[in-house]
Structure formats: C-alpha cells, structure tokens
Amino acid sequence: MSQDHGHALDRQTETPQPAVARNGDDEVIGRDEAHRRAILDAIPLMDESTPLAAELANNARRRAALAGQTFPVPRETRIFTVANQKGGVGKTTTTVNLAAALAKGGLEVLVIDNDPQGNASTALGVEHHSGTPSTYDVLINDVPMIDVVQVSPDIPGLLCVPATIDLSGAEIELVSLVARENRLRNALDAYLAERQRRGERRLDYVLVDCPPSLGLLTVNAFVTAREVLIPIQCEYYALEGLSQLLNNINLIRGHLNPDLHVSTILLTMFDGRTNLAHQVAEEVREHFPEQTLRTAIPRSVRISEAPSYGQTVITYDQNSSGALAYREAAREVARRGAAGAAISSAPSQTAAAGEVAPVSSEGVKS
C-alpha cells in the first residue's frame, strides 16, 4: 500500500469534531461557548495585592465573556429617551455607546439626535453640518424621517437621525405648530411603518438623545418614548435634579404619554477609588433597586477621546474598560428587553414623590 493511500485512509477514518460539547455537569453547550469557557478558565485569578495585574486579568475575562456574543431580540421595538436635566452626566455618551454596543451585538438600532449641539451625530460619524437634512426638518418641515436617516459608517445596523445647529431655533418655532408635542412621535411611527412596508428589518431599539432642559424638544422625546433611561453621575450633586425629573416624567405620563416609565438607570463616571462614588451608587440602588443596572460605567480617558475621532468607544478602543462596561450594560438592557421586563418608574412612594435623600460627604476621600 502506498504512503499516499495510507494517508487517505487515515483522513477517511478521522472522527469528525462534534458541534457541541459537554461540561462537567453534563450540560450540552456549543463549540464556541466551550471555547469561550476554556479561555475564561485559563485566565489566572489575581488578588488585591497586585491591583494592576488583577485589573488586566479581569478585563481579559470580560472580553472573553463578551466575544462573539449576539444579544437577544426584543419582542417589539423598544423606544428609549435618554434624559437627565443635569448637564454633564453622560447622556450623549451613554446614548451613542449603548447604541453602538447593541448594534455590535447583532441588533438594529436607531439614534435620534434631538440635541442642538449635535454631539451624538459627531460620535456616530455622520454628516451634520448646516443644511444637512436633520431632526429639525422632521420636526418643523414635516420631512419624512426615512429621508433624513443616515447609516453610521463604523458598525452595521446602526442608524442615526442627525442634529444640526438649525435645531437650536426649533423650540421657538414649535410653539405655534399644531400638535407640537407629538411631532417626533408621529414622524417615528410613520418611519417604522414605512420600513415595514418596504420589507426592511424591524428596528430593535430606538434611542433619543435629549438636551439638558425640559423644553419642547425634550417633551417631544418623552412623548415619543415608552421607556426612559436616566444616566446618573456618581458625584455629590447627582441626585439633586432627579426629583424634579421624576415629577416631570409623571406629568408627561399623566397628560401626554401614559405608557412612559423609567425602566433603566445607569451609573456613569464611577470611580471605585472614592468613598463618594460608592455612596452615590448605594443610594441610587436603594431607591431604584429594579431599574438600576448592575453595570456601572467607569471614568475612562478612552470614552472621552473617542468623539474627537468621530467614533464611539466601542470602535475606538473595544478592549478598554469603558468599552467593556458599555457592552456589558447593553447586554443587560437587551436581556431585560427579551424577558419583557416593563418596570414601573415608582418603586416606592418615597422615590415616586421625588424625596431622594442627599448623600453625605463625610469621610469622602479626596
């Protein structure tokens, strides 16, 4: 028998690799999942005596857990308004990075930039110079949203309705228009119906970015959404404006949008080295135990740098701690959506009434 013929027989008798594997508990798992678990098991555990090595090992473990994951699809399109009357808490940063993370997880996501600053449009890399068809045209000139939507160049499945400087005058122009509070909602409903008519894939998530005020732009966003996502900065004044925000949401729900509720609270700019950050996080979780995500977004240089390159942190540095945190937050949001968890915005009478206790600053590390 020739050597080549012998090798051919060996190849014919090779045992094919199974598409599934079994773990020690005799659980059937896919090959990719088995590979991911093997990587996780191979990463050494580190204690607090080596903080840098512990952080690197933890980030490696998180990357392995997220690698190749697709997020569950919600039963219907989930529409969020990302809002907080306090400025600088990470509304736009959360909107774009959460949207990018959801899209990276295989979902179809639309971001509506409803802030005249247009920072969300910048981060998503879409055109938004003066004269570009934008949110302003949708609200004021009745331009169909389907003629305004742009595709983000970095992540498949991520769409954006950009904002231009023209939107800064929309507050005044909206005052005299009929059904001024419902214009964005009507435009979005028409867009979703048009996508369905064309046979395009259904949107899984819509995220509306708001300015830090309660003018007609924000009211339009609240009327459009079914859910509110509130980013809360882990700083001393984080809870100062939350009471008023909750009262305003209750007013919108009572008069304009009965389906509106606070479903998600995300802690941002978390610095685990300070007592204050832990105190704020504990206070928020105490008042909103069901709405607050387990994931907290850390302070991260990469998150701050990404918009200057016209990117989200998900594409700018996907292995950074900030990118990993937003991907974990997106996974948590998606899993809640798949479970159909519609959570009331009033977990207790105290929180619903807006009586949020201040956080003591005694003993806080500098």
Image (spheres, rainbow, N blue to C red):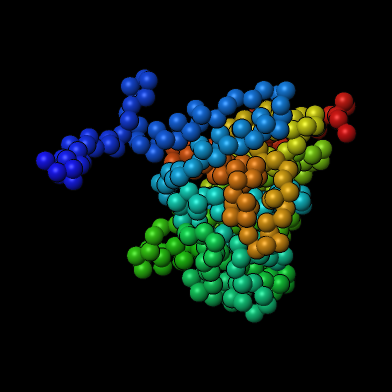
Residue 186 vs residue 120, the one in the foreground: 120
Q: Relative to 141, does residue 304 appear above or below in the rendering?
A: above
Viewer-side residue, 124 vs 343? 124
Please identify the quadrant where the C terminus is shown: top right
Dividing the picture into quadrants, the one containing residue 142 is bottom right
11 left or right of 210 in image: left
Direction left: furthest residue: 1
Outermost residue to the top:
25
Q: Position of residue 264 (x, y in %)?
A: 59, 41
Q: Quadrant of residue 197?
A: bottom left
> In the orientation shown, which residue stands out farthest toward the front?
2
Task: Name the foreground residue: 90 vs 189.
Answer: 90
Residue at screen point 69% across, 50% down = 303
| Residue 227 at x, y percent in the picture | 56, 47
Query: Residue 114: x percent and y percent?
Result: 64, 62
User: Residue at image x 71%, y 61%?
Assistant: 308
From where the camera sits, is residue 277 visible? yes
Q: Camera-side residue: 57 or 257? A: 57
For residue 152, side relative to residue 300 (left or right):
left
Q: Is residue 261 visible?
A: no
- 44 is higher (above) or lower (below) than 82: above
Count of labels shown? 0
Relative horizontal placement of residue 259, taking residue 75 as reference (left or right): right
Could you tell whether 350 is left or right of 8 in the image? Answer: right
Q: Residue 147: where, in percent of width, then height?
A: 50, 74
Quadrant in which the N terminus appears: top left
**Residue at 63% from the left image edge and 60% from the top image edge:** 311
Q: Residue at x 65, y 63 (%)?
A: 310
